Structures are given as structure tokens and as C-alpha cells.
Image (cartoon, grey):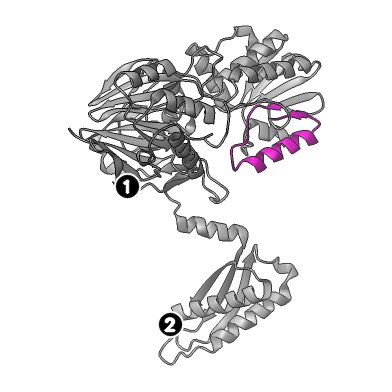
Amino acid sequence: MSPVRVTFLGGLGEIGRNCAAIEVEDRLLLLDCGLMFPTTEMPGVDLVLPDFSWLLKNRDRIEGAVLTHGHEDHVGALQFLLRELSFPLFGSALTLGLARGRIEEAGLLGRTKLVPVVDGERRKIGPFDVEFIPVTHSVPHGFATCFRTPQGNILHSGDFKIDLNPVDGRRTGLARIGAIADGEGIRLLLSDSTNAEEPGHTTSESEVGRVLADLIRKADGKRVVLACFASHIHRIQQVIDAAVSQGRTVATLGRSMNRNVKLARELGVLHYEDQSLIDIEDADTVPRDKLLIVSTGSQGEPMSALSLMAAGENRWLKVGEGDLVILSSHAIPGNETSVGKVIDGLTRRGCEVVHSGLADVHVSGHAMQGELKTLLSVARPEFFIPVHGEFRHLRHHADLATGMGVAANKVLLCEDGDVVRLDEKGVDFDGEVPAGYLYVDGIVGDVGHGVLRDRRVLSEEGVVVVVVTVDVKTGEVVSGPEIITRGWVHAPDAEPLLDEARQVVRAALEKLDHRGGVELDQVQRTARQALGRFVNDRTKRRPMIVPVVMEV
């Protein structure tokens, strides 16, 4: 009986870039293809993608991609991979709709086929037998996926929580997972680890809706602006319902918010009367205290609608006294400073700002320890691999699994690039594939680690350029050295220091022995070393030193 392999291309050791490939009978089926947003250590980078090199080498073996849900960290990289490959996509209608926008913008719809699947559907994709099991998450219509393979069932939880009172009544399919476990059994479980450090159970989305409704009810006489993720359709539904119940009209602000609200209504996921929602262009026709705006920008993105409001530069909306702004989200790690600046800017303009530090206006879409234990108890897997999270999350989840009775030697801690093999003997590591970061900065892959390192030096220490002209026959310094600096010292205020630097470089160059001929490399090296030592000794800084040698 042929072995089954799982190759992890992203999402294990970081939050984002979720992408894996399952191999059955020498064929591959992708499980998600997401991106990651850059950290402060990646100056100038727009997006971070999985390394596609292994997939490109195996392009002829790919049957398609199964999409668990519509968040960017699971579907956002498709538009880049489809530039190189062509394969069909399988997911819920909403997930495909959310992914379609980016793919269509890139002009790549012709390179794929969007195949919608529904709750409980079991579909053959080449040699793969995939069952789509509903789960609750912060975007509607997410799936856990069960792969029936020659080596037993592999269950991937997707991003999930166990919400006992979901807004749409669509609960995580624990009963179906239990039925599979009781019948065929679950050989390998791959489960979301994002909140594996957090004890207890995640609060229901319905509870957040009640808090938001109460805030809107108490905002008598005020205009309300609420910012949340554009994909959080259930949150938007509850906000619209609360606004309408208080006699308010709703307007959406932000490109992704407008697009997602329209898509969700077309698919029957979002419900409201025509007169309840107006275009932001018509917001001035509604009295301020009868208007509620649902906006993007809850993460403080630089050009988002909310950030522009905080800076007083939003073309549609000027906020100030008499406005209540609700940030219905938690700051994603790394975004805390940006979110803080937006809150500060809104407060300076006179707005009353409510965020998750002041009220329960947000709840996670990821299972906490109690729910993770519940899934382990219901699924009773023979083998377990924690996925989706930083390494500390994976470690905590692995410990939870052993605490729930999974043998320690049947729990694998994997990282990006690992390949695991499932066969009659069990699960074990089976090599590695490239899984580094692919940076997007204008065009894909034009930024390497060396470029990022240079950018960090420039941003932290600055640059000093030394320009010198030498006679190629004698090695004599004809003109210069001239010192040009950006970010090291302010030249007009530091002329004595720059004069001293020029003297140090000239003295070092005059000591060179040119009897064997002038070597420009040696001149450049000497200028760099002399200036570098001087800069470090005098200022204790290490800017980038760039020697420019011209010859006459």
C-alpha cells in the first residue's frame, strides 16, 4: 500500500503563509495558499509568500487546491502562484468569492476553475477523497477537511472555534467528526494552534454582538463609526441589525468592505433591507445621529479608511466631536503601534474611542485550550501534528495532545519545509523542501535577505558616501575626499566632524604603495575601512559606508 505524504510549505512557526500539500498515489493536492504580512524587520516589503519552488518543480502532479476559508493568510497567495501554475480551486461559495477578487484583479481567472462545495459534501479530486465538514470561525463558511487515503483518514481542522451559539446557527461539525472517529477512525489529526496557550473557551460571536448593540443603543445623539475586518461578515450582520433596530442607516467605507458586503448579500450570507444600507457618497443626506459607518482599517493600515480619518484626510468622512468610534478587533501582533497611533489621532480630533481594552468588542475566531481538548477527545487520533501558529503555540498544543492521551512518540512537532510520511509503520519525518520567505516588493521575489539587511542598516544607522578621484597612473588623490551623509549626522551642523573624516581618509590613501600599479579595489577598501573606523570611534555608530572612486 502506497505511503501518503504531507509537505508543509508555510504556517508552522509563524502566523500566516498557511500552505501544505498532501500526496496520494504520486499526485498532489494543495491545502490553502496564504500570505503573511511583513514585520517591522522587513522594511519596504508589501507581502510575504510561501516559497513556491518545490511546487513549480512538481507542477505536473498538482490536482488542485482545497481552500478551508477566505482569510488572506489562507488564500491570499493564490494570485501569485496562479501566475506560474494552473489548477482548480475547491471551497465554499463565499471562500471562492473572497479569493476570486484578488485573482480577477491579477487577470488570472482563466488559469483556474472555481468549484464550490457545500457542508458535508464528499468529493473525489483525482485520487483524493475529500469530505468538507463545517466549522465556525471569524469568517463564515469555513471547513475542516477529512482526506480518506490508503493510509487512513487525515483530518485537518482548518481555523476553527466551537461556538455553541453562532450568528448563523452553523456549528462546528463535532458530531460528524465523532462519527468518523467511531467508524473508520482518524489516523492523523492536523489542528489549529493559534490559541493553544490560552486557557478556557472562546466567547461566542453572539456575545460580541450584544456588547456592540448596547454601545450603539447608548450612543444617542452621536454618529457611530465601527471598524472591523471586512471578512467578518457575521460581525457586520450584527452591527447592521443593531443599527436598524435603533433607527440608524448604515454606510460602508473602504474598498474591501464594500466588495465583501456586496458579495455576502449576493450569496445570501448577509441579510438587510435595501433602504438600510446607503452609499457613503449619500451619507450627508442622513442626520449625524442616525448614521452608522462600517469601515476598514481596524489594524491601523497606513492608507486605510480609518487611518485617513484619524489624520483628517478621509475624502468621505471628517470625524470629531460627537463621533463614537468602535474598533471591533484586537491588534494583530506587530500592529500594536499602528493601531495606537490611529486611536491617538481619533482622540485628538475629539472622538470617543472604544476598543477591546475598554469593552468586549471583539472575540477570537480560534479555539482556546478547552475547545482544542474537545476536538482531540472527539477525534481520538492515532497521530497528531499541531499546525497554524508560532513554534510556542505548536509546542503548547503538542503538550495538550499528550495530556489528552495521544502517546508522546505519536506527536510530531513540524516546521515549514518538513515532509512527513504516513505508512503502515506510522508517521515520521521524510525529508525537507525549500520553505523560505518569498518577498513581494513591487514585483514578486525581487527582495532577498541581503537587500533587507541593507535596508535595516540604512533605517537604523544611515549611510555615509566617500567620493574620491585618483590618478590611475600615480595613485595621487586628485580631488576629494568628499563626504556625503544621510541619517548619520546632519551635514550642515557637523562640518568639523566631516572635515576630520576627510583628513583621515586622505591620510590613509596617501600611505598606499602604488609602485606595482594602482588597484582601484584597494583604494575603495582602504577608504571604506578608514572611514568606517573613524565613524565608529567618534560616534559609536555603524552606518553603511559606500566608497566611490573615480579615475582620471
Residue 287 can be seen in this image: no
Q: Quadrant of residue 483?
A: bottom right
Observer-nearest of 126 and 419: 419
Q: Which mark sits nearer the N-terminus, 2 or 1?
A: 1
Give the number of the disc on residue 433: 1
Give the number of the disc on residue 519: 2
Cα gap from disc 2 to disc 1, whole angstroms: 44 Å
The stretch of residues the image draws in magenta is 326-355
Q: Label 2 sits on what residue type?
A: Glu
The relative height of residue 96 versus residue 331 in the rendered view (above or below) is above
Residue 383 % position (x, y):
35, 34
Which residue corresponds to the image point at 30% horizontal and 42% vertical from the top-left?
428
Please count the marks in the image: 2
Q: Label 1 sits on what residue type?
A: Val
Q: Please state which of the two labelled residues, at mark 2 or mark 1, is closer to the viewer.
A: 1
Q: Quadrant of residue 213?
A: top right
Q: Quadrant of the N terminus?
A: top left
Residue 341 can be seen in this image: yes
Residue 472 % position (x, y):
46, 84
- Disc 1 element: loop
Q: Residue 342 in magenta?
A: yes
Observer-nearest of 522 and 344: 344
- Disc 2 element: loop
Q: Residue 231 in magenta?
A: no
Residue 64 % position (x, y):
30, 29
Residue 186 % position (x, y):
33, 26
The relative height of residue 121 versus residue 34 in the rendered view (above or below) is above
Label 1 Cα neighbours within 10 Å, binned few <14 / some 14-19 / many ≥20: some
| 481 with respect to 109 (left or right) | right
Give the number of the disc on residue 402: none
Observer-nearest of 166 and 529: 166
